[in-house]
Amino acid sequence: MVRTRFLIPTLLLVSLTVMIPANFAQAQTGKQRGATFGGLAGAIAGGIIGDHNDEAGAGAAIGGVVGAVAGGILGDAADKEQAARQQQYLYQQQQQQVARTVGAVSITDVINMTRSGLSDSVIINQIHSRGVQHQIQVSDIIAMHQQGVRESVISAMQQATVGSPAVVQPDPAPVVVQQPTVIHETHVLPAYPVRRYYGPHYYSPRPYHHHRPRGTSVRIGF
Protein backbone atom coordinates (compact mmCIF):
# COMPACT_ATOMS: atom_id res chain seq x y z
CA MET A 1 0.00 0.00 0.00
CA VAL A 2 2.84 2.36 0.86
CA ARG A 3 4.57 1.71 -2.43
CA THR A 4 1.32 2.37 -4.27
CA ARG A 5 0.87 5.69 -2.45
CA PHE A 6 4.38 6.75 -3.33
CA LEU A 7 4.13 5.66 -6.96
CA ILE A 8 1.46 8.27 -7.75
CA PRO A 9 3.40 11.40 -6.64
CA THR A 10 6.56 10.02 -8.21
CA LEU A 11 4.86 9.67 -11.57
CA LEU A 12 3.43 13.17 -11.20
CA LEU A 13 6.90 14.63 -10.56
CA VAL A 14 8.37 12.82 -13.54
CA SER A 15 5.50 14.01 -15.71
CA LEU A 16 6.08 17.59 -14.62
CA THR A 17 9.75 17.28 -15.54
CA VAL A 18 8.95 15.98 -18.99
CA MET A 19 6.15 18.47 -19.60
CA ILE A 20 8.23 21.58 -18.83
CA PRO A 21 8.23 23.60 -22.06
CA ALA A 22 11.57 24.11 -23.75
CA ASN A 23 11.12 27.88 -24.01
CA PHE A 24 10.40 28.08 -20.29
CA ALA A 25 13.58 26.16 -19.48
CA GLN A 26 15.59 28.44 -21.74
CA ALA A 27 14.05 31.55 -20.18
CA GLN A 28 15.12 30.49 -16.72
CA THR A 29 18.51 31.35 -15.36
CA GLY A 30 20.94 28.67 -14.30
CA LYS A 31 19.98 29.20 -10.67
CA GLN A 32 16.28 28.74 -11.40
CA ARG A 33 16.86 25.69 -13.58
CA GLY A 34 19.16 24.18 -10.99
CA ALA A 35 16.63 24.72 -8.21
CA THR A 36 13.77 23.34 -10.31
CA PHE A 37 15.42 20.19 -11.57
CA GLY A 38 17.37 19.70 -8.35
CA GLY A 39 14.14 19.84 -6.37
CA LEU A 40 12.43 17.35 -8.65
CA ALA A 41 15.36 14.95 -8.62
CA GLY A 42 15.76 15.31 -4.86
CA ALA A 43 12.08 14.65 -4.28
CA ILE A 44 12.17 11.49 -6.35
CA ALA A 45 15.37 10.24 -4.71
CA GLY A 46 14.12 11.14 -1.24
CA GLY A 47 10.81 9.43 -1.87
CA ILE A 48 12.53 6.24 -3.00
CA ILE A 49 14.81 6.23 0.04
CA GLY A 50 11.95 7.08 2.41
CA ASP A 51 9.79 4.37 0.92
CA HIS A 52 12.05 1.74 2.42
CA ASN A 53 11.30 3.18 5.87
CA ASP A 54 7.59 3.68 5.20
CA GLU A 55 8.19 7.46 5.06
CA ALA A 56 7.84 8.13 1.36
CA GLY A 57 6.11 11.50 1.79
CA ALA A 58 8.62 12.87 4.28
CA GLY A 59 11.54 11.59 2.22
CA ALA A 60 10.20 13.23 -0.92
CA ALA A 61 9.68 16.54 0.88
CA ILE A 62 13.14 16.57 2.45
CA GLY A 63 14.80 15.43 -0.77
CA GLY A 64 13.00 18.12 -2.74
CA VAL A 65 14.16 20.88 -0.41
CA VAL A 66 17.76 19.66 -0.32
CA GLY A 67 17.84 19.15 -4.08
CA ALA A 68 16.39 22.59 -4.76
CA VAL A 69 18.97 24.29 -2.52
CA ALA A 70 21.89 22.35 -3.97
CA GLY A 71 20.71 22.85 -7.54
CA GLY A 72 20.20 26.56 -6.96
CA ILE A 73 23.74 26.96 -5.60
CA LEU A 74 25.28 25.13 -8.54
CA GLY A 75 23.14 27.02 -11.03
CA ASP A 76 24.04 30.36 -9.46
CA ALA A 77 27.75 29.56 -9.76
CA ALA A 78 27.25 28.72 -13.43
CA ASP A 79 25.41 32.03 -13.97
CA LYS A 80 28.26 34.00 -12.39
CA GLU A 81 30.86 32.20 -14.47
CA GLN A 82 28.93 32.84 -17.68
CA ALA A 83 28.44 36.51 -16.79
CA ALA A 84 32.18 36.90 -16.14
CA ARG A 85 33.01 35.37 -19.53
CA GLN A 86 30.55 37.66 -21.30
CA GLN A 87 31.92 40.72 -19.53
CA GLN A 88 35.48 39.80 -20.47
CA TYR A 89 34.45 39.26 -24.09
CA LEU A 90 32.70 42.64 -24.27
CA TYR A 91 35.71 44.35 -22.72
CA GLN A 92 38.03 42.84 -25.31
CA GLN A 93 35.72 43.89 -28.12
CA GLN A 94 35.61 47.46 -26.79
CA GLN A 95 39.38 47.62 -26.52
CA GLN A 96 39.79 46.38 -30.07
CA GLN A 97 37.24 48.89 -31.33
CA VAL A 98 38.99 51.74 -29.53
CA ALA A 99 42.35 50.67 -30.96
CA ARG A 100 40.93 50.59 -34.48
CA THR A 101 39.19 53.95 -34.10
CA VAL A 102 42.26 55.75 -32.76
CA GLY A 103 44.27 54.94 -35.88
CA ALA A 104 41.45 55.74 -38.32
CA VAL A 105 41.14 58.90 -40.42
CA SER A 106 38.87 61.63 -39.07
CA ILE A 107 37.02 64.36 -40.95
CA THR A 108 39.45 66.89 -39.50
CA ASP A 109 42.36 64.88 -40.93
CA VAL A 110 40.82 64.93 -44.40
CA ILE A 111 40.18 68.68 -44.25
CA ASN A 112 43.74 69.36 -43.06
CA MET A 113 45.26 67.18 -45.79
CA THR A 114 43.13 68.95 -48.40
CA ARG A 115 44.21 72.38 -47.16
CA SER A 116 47.84 71.24 -47.21
CA GLY A 117 47.57 70.68 -50.95
CA LEU A 118 47.92 66.90 -50.95
CA SER A 119 46.58 65.12 -54.01
CA ASP A 120 43.34 63.19 -53.93
CA SER A 121 45.16 59.88 -54.51
CA VAL A 122 47.31 60.35 -51.40
CA ILE A 123 44.28 61.22 -49.24
CA ILE A 124 42.26 58.30 -50.63
CA ASN A 125 45.13 55.88 -49.96
CA GLN A 126 45.17 57.01 -46.34
CA ILE A 127 41.41 56.49 -46.09
CA HIS A 128 41.60 52.99 -47.57
CA SER A 129 44.52 51.88 -45.44
CA ARG A 130 43.39 53.36 -42.12
CA GLY A 131 39.59 53.51 -42.41
CA VAL A 132 37.37 56.23 -40.94
CA GLN A 133 36.49 56.90 -37.32
CA HIS A 134 32.72 56.76 -37.81
CA GLN A 135 30.09 56.36 -40.48
CA ILE A 136 29.83 59.51 -42.60
CA GLN A 137 26.57 61.42 -42.14
CA VAL A 138 24.92 64.07 -44.33
CA SER A 139 26.16 66.85 -42.07
CA ASP A 140 29.72 65.54 -42.44
CA ILE A 141 29.44 65.58 -46.22
CA ILE A 142 28.23 69.18 -46.20
CA ALA A 143 30.99 70.25 -43.81
CA MET A 144 33.73 68.65 -45.92
CA HIS A 145 32.33 70.13 -49.12
CA GLN A 146 32.31 73.59 -47.55
CA GLN A 147 35.96 73.13 -46.55
CA GLY A 148 37.00 72.35 -50.11
CA VAL A 149 37.21 68.56 -49.92
CA ARG A 150 36.66 67.15 -53.39
CA GLU A 151 33.89 64.68 -54.23
CA SER A 152 36.24 61.76 -54.96
CA VAL A 153 37.63 62.03 -51.43
CA ILE A 154 34.13 62.32 -49.94
CA SER A 155 33.06 59.21 -51.87
CA ALA A 156 36.08 57.34 -50.52
CA MET A 157 35.07 58.39 -47.00
CA GLN A 158 31.56 57.01 -47.56
CA GLN A 159 32.86 53.65 -48.82
CA ALA A 160 35.61 53.20 -46.25
CA THR A 161 35.36 50.80 -43.34
CA VAL A 162 34.78 52.16 -39.86
CA GLY A 163 37.96 51.71 -37.86
CA SER A 164 41.28 50.44 -39.04
CA PRO A 165 41.02 47.39 -41.28
CA ALA A 166 42.07 44.16 -39.68
CA VAL A 167 45.74 43.63 -40.23
CA VAL A 168 46.75 40.12 -41.11
CA GLN A 169 49.77 39.26 -39.06
CA PRO A 170 52.49 37.73 -41.20
CA ASP A 171 53.84 34.37 -40.31
CA PRO A 172 56.85 34.63 -38.05
CA ALA A 173 60.14 34.35 -39.83
CA PRO A 174 61.82 31.00 -39.41
CA VAL A 175 64.49 30.98 -36.77
CA VAL A 176 67.85 30.17 -38.25
CA VAL A 177 70.15 28.53 -35.78
CA GLN A 178 73.75 29.22 -36.66
CA GLN A 179 75.64 25.99 -36.46
CA PRO A 180 79.23 26.25 -35.25
CA THR A 181 81.90 25.61 -37.86
CA VAL A 182 83.72 22.39 -37.19
CA ILE A 183 87.23 22.11 -38.66
CA HIS A 184 88.67 18.64 -38.90
CA GLU A 185 92.48 18.60 -38.94
CA THR A 186 94.45 15.45 -39.70
CA HIS A 187 97.94 15.21 -38.29
CA VAL A 188 100.23 12.54 -39.79
CA LEU A 189 102.87 11.39 -37.37
CA PRO A 190 106.24 10.38 -38.89
CA ALA A 191 107.10 6.71 -38.79
CA TYR A 192 110.03 6.02 -36.49
CA PRO A 193 111.98 2.74 -36.65
CA VAL A 194 111.28 0.43 -33.81
CA ARG A 195 114.35 -0.05 -31.71
CA ARG A 196 114.91 -3.52 -30.44
CA TYR A 197 116.84 -4.10 -27.27
CA TYR A 198 119.12 -7.09 -27.18
CA GLY A 199 120.22 -7.97 -23.68
CA PRO A 200 122.80 -10.56 -22.59
CA HIS A 201 121.78 -14.12 -23.29
CA TYR A 202 122.46 -16.74 -20.71
CA TYR A 203 122.92 -20.33 -21.69
CA SER A 204 122.45 -23.08 -19.20
CA PRO A 205 125.48 -25.38 -18.78
CA ARG A 206 125.42 -28.72 -20.39
CA PRO A 207 124.64 -31.60 -18.09
CA TYR A 208 127.83 -33.32 -16.82
CA HIS A 209 127.92 -37.12 -16.54
CA HIS A 210 130.66 -38.77 -14.42
CA HIS A 211 132.39 -41.71 -16.20
CA ARG A 212 134.66 -44.20 -14.62
CA PRO A 213 138.15 -44.12 -16.10
CA ARG A 214 138.88 -46.87 -18.46
CA GLY A 215 142.02 -49.01 -18.00
CA THR A 216 143.39 -52.19 -16.50
CA SER A 217 142.56 -52.89 -12.97
CA VAL A 218 145.09 -54.81 -10.85
CA ARG A 219 143.93 -56.76 -7.94
CA ILE A 220 146.50 -58.17 -5.49
CA GLY A 221 145.39 -60.94 -3.27
CA PHE A 222 147.15 -62.54 -0.28
Image: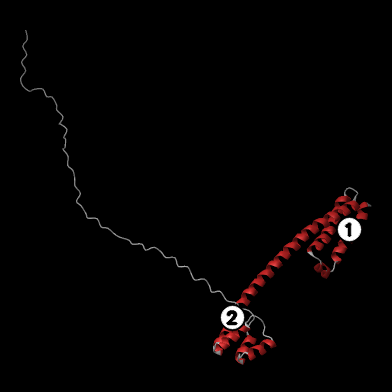
* Front residue of this view, candidates 40 and 215: 40
Q: Secondary structure at mark 1?
A: helix
Q: Secondary structure at mark 2?
A: helix
Position of 180 with respect to 55 (left or right) is left
Residue 18 location (% of width, % of height): 85, 65
How packed is label 2: few (under 14 Cα within 10 Å), some, or many (20 or more)? many
Residue 194 location (% of width, % of height): 20, 49
Residue 173 location (% of width, % of height): 49, 71
* Front residue of this view, candidates 177 and 119: 119
Badges 2 and 1: C-beta atoms under 8 Å apart? no
Q: Which residue is mark 1?
A: 10
> Could you tell me which quadrant the C terminus lies in?
top left
| Front label number (2 vs 1) | 2
Residue 130 - label = 2
* Front residue of this view, candidates 195 and 181: 181
Residue at image coords 90%, 61%: 12
Mark 1 residue type? Thr
Location of residue 181 by image quarter:
bottom left
Q: Which of marks 1 and 2 precedes in the sequence?
A: 1
Mark 2 residue type? Arg
Location of residue 208 by image quarter:
top left
Residue 127 location (% of width, % of height): 59, 84
Residue 186 - label = none
Residue 41 visible to the viewer = no
How packed is label 1: few (under 14 Cα within 10 Å), some, or many (20 or more)? some
Q: Determine the CA span between mark 2 and mark 1.
A: 66 Å
